Every structure is written in C-alpha cells, then in structure tokens.
Amino acid sequence: MAARKKVSRKKTTKKSSRKKVARKAASKKKVAKKKEKKKVTKKKTKKKVAKKKAKKKVTKKKTKKKVAKKKVAKKKVAKKKLPAKKKVSKKKVAAKAEPAPKKKKPAKKINKKQILAKSAKVHRPLRSGIHKAVNPADLVPTRPRRRRKKVSDDQLVHGIEPYIQEKGEEYMNDRQLAHFRKILQAWKAELMEEVDRTVHHMQDEASNFPDPNDRATQESEFGLELRTRDRERKLLKKIDQAIARTEDRSYGYCEETGEEIGLKRLEARPVATLSVEAQERRELAERQFRDQDDRYR
C-alpha cells in the first residue's frame, strides 16, 4: 500500500510540473506576440508621421511659388500704370519756388518816460487845418481795470466789503484808517439798534401774568437780555476808544510791543489792541496767576 501511494504521488508531481512548464511557455509566447505587435504599430506611426511631413513640405513649396508669382504680377502691373517722369529743368523749379515768408518784428514795449521826455506837446492836425496841442500822456495806452469779484454776505464785515491791500502800500494809511473807521461806526450803530429794541420790547411785553410759571419765564428772559446788553455796553466803550485811536493814528499797533497787528486780525476783531503773540502771552498769564493777582480775576 505504501509503495502504491508513493507511485501515485510521483505521478501527480510530474503532472503538476508539466502543467507549470506549459503555462510558462504559453505566457512567454503571449509576451513575444505583444512585443511584435508594438513594434509593428510603432513602424506604422513612424511611416504616417513621415508622410504628413512630406505633405507639409510640398504644400509650403506650392504656397511660396504662388506668392512669388503674385508679387511678380503686381510689379508688372505697377510698372505699366506708372507714367514716364518728365524731366524738369532747375531754372523752372527755382522760378516756381515761392519766396520765403518775412519774419515778423517783435512788438516794441511802450515806455511812458520816453514818450513824455520827447516833447512837452504834440501837434495834431484838425479837419480845418489848424494844429491842436495834445498832451503826450494821453497817447500812452491805459491798462483796463480789473473787475472786482462779487463778495458774498458771509464775507462782509458788518455790512462793509473787506479791504484789498495793494503791493507796496503803506500800513495804516488814510484809506485803511477810513475803512476801519467805517467798520467801527457800523458796528456801533448795530449795537445801539439792539439797545433800543430791548427797551421797547421790555416796555411793551411787561405784564403781570396770573400764572407764576409764566411770570418766572418772562423774568428769566428779561434777565438774559439785560445781561447781554451789559456786555454790549462794555463793548461800546471799546469801540469808542478804537474810533479815537483812528483819529490820532495809533490804531492798528500793539499797545505792549508797538508791532503791527495786521489787517486780517483787525477785520476779524476791529477792537483788538494786542498782536497775536502778545494776546497769547496775556492769556497764559491769566491762566497761571488768576488766583494770585487781582488783575486777572
């Protein structure tokens, strides 16, 4: 029994080995066939690419030939159309050439002094033949005056237009003093009108209301008006002092340093007696020594 089993095992091992060998051979054949197929396809693709390149070269050559033929045909047509050039003599060209334009002389500047120095009087003939004496100053052309821009109501200083300073103008001359005197007088008139208005208002509307609340509101309104009028009373004193300074020509100069206050500052605050720097110093002193010195209380 043991001998039979060994024989049967040997037979099965031989059969399995044969099957393996057959499988390996079959797989090798398949691989070889695939490689052959790949080589064939590569050759075919190479041939197709070569054919395409050859076709492209042929088409390029044909297009170049067509372009060259068209250019030659165009040149021939252009030569036929162009007329023969006539020879022109140099003398005729010189005769036809236009004369060069004359250069314009620069305009001479008019000098008033030279005109006035030439002669005191210039004689100009009239229709009747009699010569009339003319002043040379009248012959000098006058410059047109610039129109002043319209000033809005916000820019007016108490109903008066702001002062426009000219170049090289002297500080606080007669014109400037008159301008600021007008501003001060207009301001004073406005304050006096307010005083009259409050007096009439208090006389007309003063009445004993039965309701205590209405009476209290009326008294508080009158108190506010009287307080504002008291401030304006002090302001009126300063305005009178400023008008007096315009008359003795000390207006527009700082009382402490003697420097110029400036037109812009005076238009903003016509009652100003100190320059900006002096005013700043005064305010600093007020803050520091308010409790110590009675002047700043």
Image (spheres, helix red, strand yellow):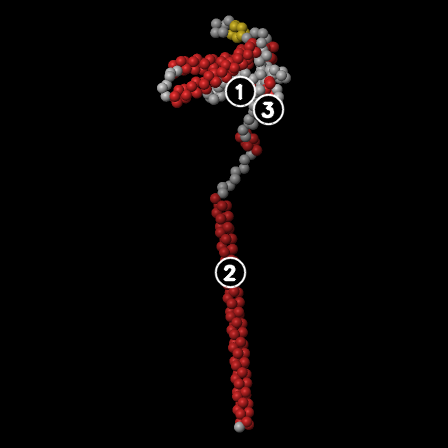
**Which tag, 2 or 1, sits closer to the chain's start?**
2
Asked if residue 224 is positioned above or below residue 23 in the image, the reply reads: above
Please give the label number shown on residue 185: none
Residue at figure coordinates x 51%, y 55% from the top left: 64
Can you see residue 160? no
From where the camera sits, is residue 215 visible? yes
Cβ atoms at labels 2 and 1 below 8 Å apart = no
- Secondary structure beneath label 3: helix
Name the residue beneath numbered marker 1. Answer: 268
Eye-nearest disc, 2 or 1: 1
- Identify which amino acid the numbered label 1 is placed on: Ala
Dot 3 alpha-carbon crowd within 10 angstroms: few under 14, some 14 to 19, many 20 or more: few
Q: How many marks?
A: 3
Q: Are marks 3 and 2 in contact (CB under 8 Å)?
A: no
> Which numbered disc flags the more N-terminal residue, 3 or 2?
2
Q: Quadrant of residue 103?
A: top right
Label of residue 56 in the image:
2
Residue at horizontal 50 percent and vertical 5 percent from the top: 129
Which corner quadrant holds the C terminus? top right
Q: Position of residue 95 (x, y in %)?
A: 55, 29
Q: Which residue is mark 3?
A: 287
First along the sequence among labels 1 and 3: 1
Q: Nearer the viewer, residue 58 or 265?
A: 265
Cα distance in 3D space between marks 3 and 2: 100 Å
**The residue under label 2 is which amino acid type?**
Lys
